[in-house]
Structure formats: structure tokens, C-alpha cells
Image (cartoon, grey):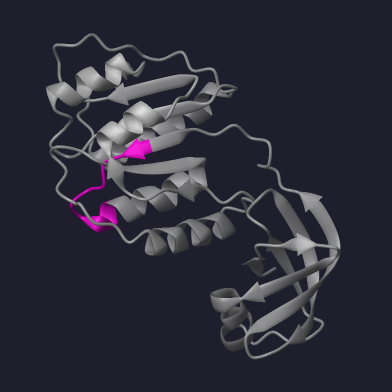
Amino acid sequence: MHRFYSSLIENNKAVLLNDEAHHAQKVLRLNVGDEIEVFDGKGTNAIANLSSISKKEVQLEIKTEVEGWDKNLNLPSIAIAPTKNINRLEWFVEKATEIGVSNIYPILCKRSERKILRIDRLEKLILSATKQSKRSILPKIFELQPFENFITKNRFEQSYVGYCDEDTVKISPSINSKQTTCFLIGPEGDFTPNEIKLAIENQFQPITFGESRLRTETAAIFACAMFQNAKK
């Protein structure tokens, strides 16, 4: 069954707008009466029929409405320095959405090589991956922000930072999957010593991802999988 996103499902009604409406009308050529699945990105899934089609929108009549399987999941946040090759960051965003992530915080570090992001494009990738993976919650991606801003203005019950410096003793975290959790992943040139110091001063625990030296996007995916494994 074709799956669509609508920001509002209410009173047995929903509306497809913009790209979603275009996809239903022009690409799939759906007609009034056709049945689809729709989700609101906030935890609700529904089965609906197309009730009317106009140039700018598609009206839906909700038949059944159910709570999404992931509505009450506690999922980790990832703060990540965008990679120089945008394809690698886009791959991370897509796969993290599929595996399970709540928030993505792009951070600008001293050694960052990419300093501009098109958040709108990344949001489209998140939406596509959410549809594909049958999730009902849309992960949130924030605007690129300086490392210092993120570190000092955000607090989580569990905060971890991964980096390559071999002189620091790092732990293999014992993750409590019921607590708010953030993994901090640096740029391809790694965090500077001052950034590591600032992270630790703000309650981020140094962690190890094993003996392999991982790429930025691989480390971030590893963190998502590590959190999922902690739930079992």
C-alpha cells in the first residue's frame, strides 16, 4: 500500500500537500476512492481513502487510525560534524532514520571542512527514509550550529563523545535505553584537544567504538546501533 505524509490527521480527515499531493496525483495517478496509508510524523498511522483531488491538494477520509509502533520509543540524539563529502552525511541521515534516531544536530567544529548545509534536502531524505522504514515519528534535524553552542546549551541524561585520541581512557558505555541519550561525533580531522576538554567538562563521557578507526558517518551509525542493542 502506498504511504504518504500529512502534517495533520484530525477529525477523520487529512490533507496531502505539495510534493505528497503531486506524487499521489501525477506520479501514482491515484483516484478518488483509492486506499492509502498516511502518517503525521508525530506517532499516528492511518488507513484512508482519497475523497477529493484538486490542483494543489488531495483530501483524505480516514477509515482507521492507529498509534505508530515507534510513538513511545526513546531513541538517541546524534550530534555530528558534517562530512566534506555530502553524500556520506546524506547516507548517515538516511540510515540513522531507518535504524532509529530522535534528533540530529549538525555541529560546526574547529576542523570541520563543510560549513554550509541544505537542511531542506536532508529533511526530504528523512521523510523518505521514514516512509520506507514504516516509522510514524519524523526525526528532527536542526540547523548547523557551532560546537560550543551545542555543548553548553543542550543537556541529556546520558552524553557520550567519541574521538581518536589514544591517550584518554575511554569506556564501553553501559547504556540505559530509557534515558535521553546523545552521542557526539567529530569531523574527519577529529575534535581538537580543547573541544574534547569542553565536552568532558559538560558531562560528555569519552567512549570507545572498538579497535577500528571509523569514519565520521560510520561512527554515528555505530552509535545508533549500540543504543538499539542496549534495548535488548
Q: Tell me if residue 103 comes above or below residue 48 in the rendering.
A: above
Examine the rendering and report whether any part of residue 211 can be seen: no
**Residue 154 falls left or right of residue 189:** right
Task: Tell whether 179 sits left or right of 84.
Answer: right
Question: For the point 15% across and 16% down, which residue is it?
Answer: 166
Q: In the displayed structure, does residue 19 sit left or right of residue 213? A: right
Asked if residue 232 is among those painted magenta in the image, a careful observer would answer: no
Q: Residue at x 33, y 18 (%)?
A: 202
- Residue drawn at (47%, 56%), measured in percent from left and top? 126
Count of marks overlaid on the render: 0
Locate the C terminus and report the quarter of the image it occupies.
top right
Relative to 12, does residue 18 appear above or below in the rendering?
below
Across and down, in percent, residue 119 comes to 37, 58
Residue 191's spot in the image, x, y percent?
Answer: 18, 30
Question: Does the stretch in magenta take in 82?
Answer: yes
Tell me which segment is drawn in magenta.
Answer: 79-88
Q: Nearer the viewer, residue 107 or 25?
A: 107
Which residue is at 66% across, 82% downward? 57
> Do we see residue 21 in this rendering?
yes
Q: Residue furthest bottom?
A: 55
Residue 73 horizontal side relative to residue 127, left or right: right
Where does the N terminus fall, quadrant-wise? bottom right
Instruction: Compare residues 52 and 100 and report the one nearer the observer.
Output: 52
Residue furthest to the top: 169
Residue 87: x %, y % from top left: 27, 58
Question: Where does the image place residue 115, in percent across and percent down from the top left?
Answer: 20, 52
